[in-house]
Every structure is written in C-alpha cells, then in structure tokens.
Image: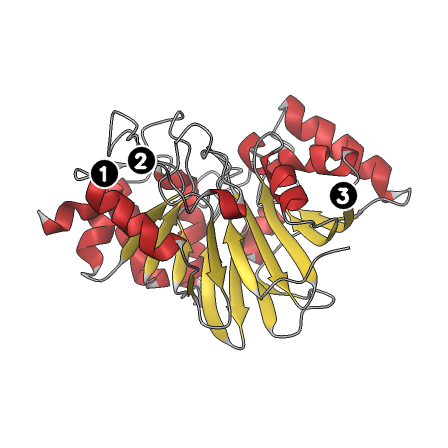
Amino acid sequence: MNTTHDPSLVVLDVGHGNANIIHENGVTVVVDTGLKGRLLEYLLHRNISQIELVILSHSDADHISGLAGMLSAGISVNAVVLNADADKNSEAWRDLIFVLDEEHYKNGPKLTVGLADGPLPIPGFKNALLEVAAPTRLLAAFGVGGKDKQDRLITSNSLSAVIRVLYNGTPVALLSGDMDEITLDEIISKKINAKALFLVFPHHGGLPNAANPTAFASKLMDTVQPQTVIFSLGREKHANPNAAILETILKHTNSVRIGCTQLSKQCSEEIPSATRTFAPALFSAGWKGSLCCAGTMEIRLLQPDISEPTKTEHQQFIIEHVPQALCQQRQR
C-alpha cells in the first residue's frame, strides 16, 4: 500500500539519469526509472509499494535501468507503456523487454507499446492530468530509423516521450526526457501546447545531439516558457549543464530559476564541506557523498513550487558555498 502523500511531482536525484514520480489521490505514476536501484530506495523510503503506471520515455539505460530492480524487489506495477526501438541493441533494453513481455502474460505489469501526442488517462487520478506532448503520431508511425519531412533521421531521442503534468488545469511541468530538435520542431509545427511552469531540461543539460545548443535552448524556452528549469544530472558524469545552454536560458528571462540535482563540476571543481541538510528527507543519490546541489526536488501540485526546506536552503547553499555557480552568472 502507499502512504498518503500530498499531490506532488518529485524530480528524483538519481545521479546521471532521469526518474520522476507523480503522487495524486493515493495513486503513484513514474516517468523513467533512472540507473541502478535509486528509484527503489526512494520508494522504500517513502513506503510506496504500488505503482499504477511506469512510463519509459525511451530506451537509454539511464532512463530504464531502475525498473527491473523494482519488479524483482516486489514493487507492484500495474502497467508499463513505452515506444518500440528496434535499433537499440543494448543489453539493458533487450533484457528489460524480455522481462516485461514475460510478465505481461503472467500477473505482472501490462505492457503497452505506443506513445503519441494526446492525453494519457491514469486510473485513480482526480485533479492531475498527464499529456503526451511528443512524439507526434508522424514520428511514432515512422519510428526509429525513419526520416521526417525534412529528411532527417529519426533516432531514439526523436521518439523520446515528452510528458506534461497538469493539476486543476494548471500546466505544472514538462518532463522532456532526451527530446531532440526533430521532436521540438514537431511540437512547434503541430501547435502542441508544451507550456509549463517547470521544465526538466533534456539530455541532463548536455549537448542536444547535432543541434546548435544555443539555438535549441532558445527555441525550447520560447516553447515552454518555464519559470524554473531543472537539470537532473550526475556530478561524476559529463560536464553538464553545458555552459552555452545555461547562458541562453538565463538570457531568456531575468526571473528564471535554475535547480540542479547534483553539483556540477562546471560550478565547483571541489566539493564544499557544507552539509546539505535538506537532501536526506526525500532521498537523494548524491547525499552521502555530498554531491547534491538541490538534490531531489519535490514540486507541490496544489500551489506549484519547490517544497521547503529545499527551496530556501538550496539557494542559501549556492550563495554561501558555490559563489561561481553558473546559475548565478547573470548577477556578476
């Protein structure tokens, strides 16, 4: 059984990867499951044993690898939905598909293959609504390996599911997976509403494949118009967020807020000795090694904002201990 939770969206610190959890009316939905067992640790920490739906945005290991561990640990999952990817030949993807296929015909989660733009009904949700902003039906129909109208190759990232979370009609967040320029251009050309108060930035703030990072970030910010941008990243993996992307975001509006789950080496080569006292309450993968910046971020859906003490203490941590943080560069 699940314990009672206020309606919320949790952007989980899993290190390099993505895992997002939506709680509403006693129902839990997961969008991506991160690497290793970090999502499982969060679920056990919060006494959550039943998941209504797991949405896998695409086939990359850092978005899917946590699911097998959840199932083997006895977490009950009613359904899983994903898009096919015949090009992905990774061991993690193949093993997971074999497991899900087998479980579908037993008493395990029911597997649905096929995500495309439109509402995504969630049994038990009362005031929360999930919308698939991408892939569009055009991209989903061609699939990985096909080509779009501009003769560009459709990749796993082009098919990455982009999920918009609404509550009482308010567009709270856009969970962008690893969407690429093809995905974004389709959203724009089809006039799909992707506006949201919070944007979980694609590629963990890294380079968007072959697209120009400045142009991509600018176009995405124009489309989503977020008040807060979140980067789900691992300090020990890649040099994220990309400086050009972050500079573009900060130039887009003077009031945009930035939150990174872990402290980027771009902001501080050394790990500050200060304890992130706000990190343990929700479980953060980077807490034990003092790798957190904001750590796990919980967004309350009733009045959308990052919950306390994270909201206040994260900002204090940056000001006092990370004076060269990229998110503060507009103030210098």
Q: Nearer the viewer, mark 3 or mark 2?
A: 2
Q: Quadrant of residue 88?
A: top right
* Side of 239 where 233 appears, left or right: right
Q: Position of residue 237 (x, y in %)?
A: 40, 26
Judge whether 123 appears above or below 41 on screen: below
Q: The residue tagged with tag 2: helix, strand or loop?
A: loop
Mark found first going from the N terminus, 3 or 1:
3
Mark found first going from the N terminus, 3 or 2:
3
* Residue 75 badge: 3
Residue shown at the point (39%, 32%) measured from the top left:
291
Asked if disc 3 and disc 1 are in contact, CB closer than 8 Å, the reply is no
* Side of 158 where 238 appears, left or right: left
Q: Position of residue 183 (x, y in %)?
A: 45, 50
36 vs 106, nearest the viewer: 36
Disc 2 marks a residue whose amino acid type is: Ala
Disc 1 marks a residue whose amino acid type is: His
Residue that label 1 marks: 321
144 vs 89, nearest the viewer: 89
Outermost residue toward the bottom in this view: 168
Residue that label 2 marks: 274
Outermost residue toward the top in this view: 91
